[in-house]
Image (cartoon, grey):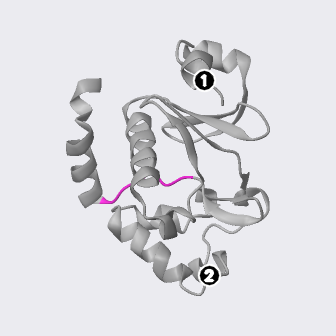
Amino acid sequence: MTDFNSLLGSLSDDDIRKKYRLLGQGDSRKVFALNEDLVLKLAKGMEGIYQNSVEHYVFTHAEVKLSLYLCPVVWFTPRMLVMRRAIPLSSTTHKKHINLGAMRKEPNAPMDLYNLTNKFMLYYEDIISVSSWGILKGLNVLIDYGCTNKMGDAYYNSLFSMEKYL
């Protein structure tokens, strides 16, 4: 088992940039390849810390049936989140949105994903975005599930006490 605290805990953003290959980035996080099996999501600022915290919370609090739709979180600090490495679905299609009913073979997949979105107050437009999905071990999984709707913003900001990071 990897000791991520020792491996990553003391690295600066520059150290990470020099040591690991950048795979991509969004508005609030950069994604680096740690190896063929793992990625590091590095927060650029407060919004990235928030998204890392939400993804960790969702993954650790989702019931088993719903967690099967999520790319597993392996290690977490608010600034850094290590996740299994999936092949981004955006590398295989040019579509902007996906059909939730076609993402998985489970008959209840659309309802499960709807329930996941509602239970954790996730931003629906992100859940149906191709860029939020990847392929891991032959299954489509959510690789980006850290954006929340307005109710989620209020709930998670309160839950995480984000002011301690300011």
**Residue 105 position in % (x across, y down):** 67, 81
The quarter of the displayed image where residue 8 is located: top right
How far apart, in angstroms, are the residues tagged by discs 2 and 1? 35 Å
Tell me the residue at 65%/27% (across/down): 2
Label 1: how many residues lie within 10 Å, few (<14), some (14-19) or many (20+)? few
Element under label 1?
loop
Which residue in the structure is indicated by mark 1? 3
Q: Is residue 147 magenta?
A: yes
Label 2: how many residues lie within 10 Å, few (<14), some (14-19) or many (20+)? few
- Residue type, mark 2 in image: Glu
The relative height of residue 103 versus residue 126 in the rendered view (above or below) is below
Q: Residue furthest bottom?
A: 107
The quarter of the displayed image where residue 129 is located: bottom right
**Residue 23 position in % (x across, y down):** 71, 37
Tell me which segment is drawn in magenta. Answer: 144-149
- Residue type, mark 1 in image: Asp
Q: Does residue 166 appear in the picture of this structure?
A: no
Which residue in the structure is indicated by mark 2? 106
Q: Does residue 96 appear in the picture of this structure?
A: yes
Left/right of residue 21 with respect to residue 132 in the rendered view? right
Where, quadrant-wise, is the N terminus in this rendering? top right
Q: Are marks 2 and 1 in contact (CB under 8 Å)?
A: no
* Closer-to-camera residue (3/142): 3
Which callout, 2 or 1, points to the residue nearer the camera?
A: 1
